[in-house]
Amino acid sequence: MKKNPYQPIETNLIEVISESPVIKTFVLQPKEGFRFNTGQFIELSLNGTGEAPFTPSSDPNISKEIEVTIMNAGRLTAGLHQLKNGETLGIRGPYGKGYPLNEFKGKNILIVGGGVGLAPLRSLIYSLLADTSSFGKIYLCYGAKTPQDIIYKNQIQKWKRAIDIKISVDRADDDWKGNVGVVTTLLNDFKENLSNFISIVCGPPIMMKFTTYKLIDIGFKPSDIYLSMEKNMSCGLGKCGHCRMGRFYVCKDGPVFTFDKIKDMHDLWD
Ligand SMILES: Cc1cc2nc3c(=O)[nH]c(=O)nc-3n(C[C@H](O)[C@H](O)[C@H](O)COP(=O)(O)OP(=O)(O)OC[C@H]3O[C@@H](n4cnc5c(N)ncnc54)[C@H](O)[C@@H]3O)c2cc1C
Ligand code: FES
């Protein structure tokens, strides 16, 4: 019998890692095999509350466990943030096309992340670091509201061996020695030769909008800017139309798009 595509796979919650006052990483162990490509998303369900889309933040080469990093933004995510180890969740997917790693091969890569937008980018970074000889130089510019809101602090320290990393906060505290300002301010000093560069951006819509315009300003071509679009989703399967953006269904045709494909859509940043 054909499997019901809406039927979630039962999944054990085996660890909850607090990343910031409002962001937690959930380590999940699906009861059957589950693989995803970096940048694809899942629908995660909490019994009696509902389901929502999230992009795994873990290494896609690890199939026994997947990690999702979730900001407490509303009803479902508040419920998830209350959970303790040992509870059962549902996942279905993976959905969407994810990051086209083959297109990135041989290129220098500038990754720009804002807030919890570093979650899908962490999965991408694991994939890039697993195969460094295939890619050029990797740069990461990351923006968070305050130093307490910076996620993956330990991993960032390790990534510094292989990645040129700059971090900015909107509001500093007394101990912060780094840049202060929105993440685009980090791009003011980005003076590399862009002939063999791509950029990958993930964050809240307003951050993606201003980052994209800044990248164009400093010389990136729209076709070299990869954006992870977040639209309202329901089925995840290209059937319900909730995620429609112009001629695309974000769940099926995306969620990753190059800017040239979507730049003329009127509701792009809504
Ligand atoms: C492809 C895709 C991948 C995603 N990946 C991730 C991810 O990896 N990590 C992640 O954290 N999120 C991710 N998201 C976003 C995530 O799906 C939403 O945050 C989630 O659906 C919110 O569900 P909710 O029921 O908790 O919020 P809802 O209750 O549906 O609230 C949604 C919105 O309303 C606002 N809101 C809710 N309650 C209030 C209130 N009381 N006052 C004012 N405003 C309020 C919230 O700020 C939020 O913007 C992704 C989205 C998509 C489309
Ligand atoms: S979420 Fe249903 S068509 Fe995309």
Image (cartoon, rainbow, N blue to C red):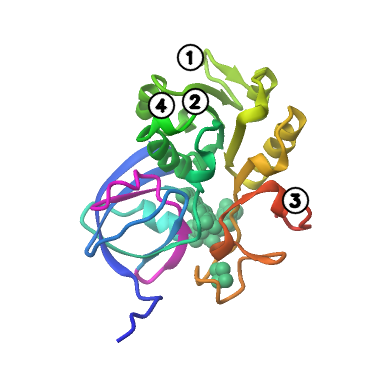
Asked whether the beta carbons under mark 1 and mark 2 sit within 8 Å of each other, the answer is: yes
Amino acid at the residue labelled 3: Lys
- Of marks 2 and 4, which one's residue comes earlier in the chain? 2
Q: Amino acid at mark 2?
A: Pro
- Residue 208 is tagged as none
Please provide the residue range marked out in magenta.
47-68
Judge left or right: residue 120 versus residue 238.
Answer: left
Identify residue type, mark 4. Answer: Ile
Q: Quadrant of ligand 2?
A: bottom right
Check disc 2 and report the residue beneath it. Answer: 147
- Distance from the alpha carbon under mark 4 to that under mark 1: 18 Å
What percent of the width, then of the height, locates residue 2? 33, 83
Residue 182 visible in the shown view: no
Q: Earlier in the sequence, mark 1 or mark 2?
A: 2
Say which residue appears at 37% left-offset and 55% top-offset. 36
Q: Is residue 123 visible?
A: yes
- Of badges 2 and 4, nearer the viewer stands 4
Query: Contact (CB < 8 A) between labels 3 and 2?
Result: no
Q: Is residue 47 above or below residue 176?
A: below
Mark 2: which secondary structure?
A: helix
The residue pinned by badge 3 equals: 263
Residue 63 lies in the magenta-colored region: yes
